[in-house]
Image: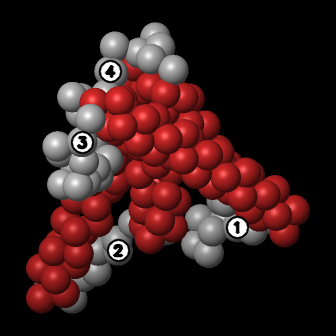
Amino acid sequence: MIRTVSLGWAILGGVLLLAIVGVTVVNVGAFALDRAARIWGGEVGGLPGYEDFVRLAVAAAIPMFFPYCQVRRGHLAVDLFLKNSPLALRRGIDRFSLLLMAALAVFLAYWMTLGMLETRDDGALSRVLGWQEWPFYITGILSLVLWALVALTQVFGLTEDAPTHG
């Protein structure tokens, strides 16, 4: 279940990144058209608020990949020193590192929530588009909570993605 949710969340992040690429292509195309139009005295404007959209969308999309990365055990792991250690030690260290990963994700979610509340209370708006910035924190907070849940399910062996170290 958590694997499916994490995969769906990552796919949504991918859709958001595709939207960023699409907007970037349109904006670059407008720049090229503007260059050509200037030869004949014309002008083609780029997308107003392009930088606002990209900044907010990237901030929302990138954390959406963290939970699925954890499901796949795609985070950095250093096995050099533990390679020849007893299996029980490797599993213990694996569980401990998963607990630390979950604690880190919860810690970051907590502080990101405080940041979102402060941004909301300040009424922060994007410069050109005038969008409220605080809603873009929500995907990051949800991503961090989901990341922590994935790590905890791996600690307690509640997922088919058990440790691969042994």
Q: Earlier in the sequence, mark 4 or mark 2?
A: 2
Position of 157 relative to 55 (above/below): above
Residue drawn at the location 32% of the way across and 37% of the way down: 90
Position of 77 relative to 72 (above/below): below
| Residue 78 image point, x, y percent | 25, 54
**Snapshot colouring:** secondary structure
The amino acid sitting under disc 3 is Ser
Which residue is disc 3 drawn over?
85
In what element is the residue under mark 3?
loop
Q: Earlier in the sequence, mark 4 or mark 3?
A: 3
- Depth check, mark 1 against mark 3: the one in front is 3
- Depth check, mark 1 against mark 2: the one in front is 1
- Depth check, mark 4 against mark 3: the one in front is 3
Position of 161 relative to 144 (above/below): above
| Residue 50 image point, x, y percent | 42, 67
- Depth check, mark 4 against mark 2: the one in front is 4
| Residue 127 image point, x, y percent | 62, 75
Q: Nearer the viewer, residue 166 or 33?
A: 166
**Quarter assignment of residue 84:** top left
In what element is the residue under mark 1?
loop
> Badges 3 and 2: C-beta atoms under 8 Å apart?
no
**Quarter assignment of residue 123:** bottom right
Q: Nearer the viewer, residue 121 or 147?
A: 147
Q: Earlier in the sequence, mark 4 or mark 1?
A: 1
In what element is the residue under mark 4?
loop
Residue drawn at the location 23% of the way across and 75% of the way down: 31
Which residue is disc 2 drawn over?
45
Residue drawn at the location 19% of the way across and 87% of the way down: 38
The amino acid sitting under disc 4 is Asp
**Local crowd at mark 4 within 10 Å, few (<14), some, or many (≥20)?**
some
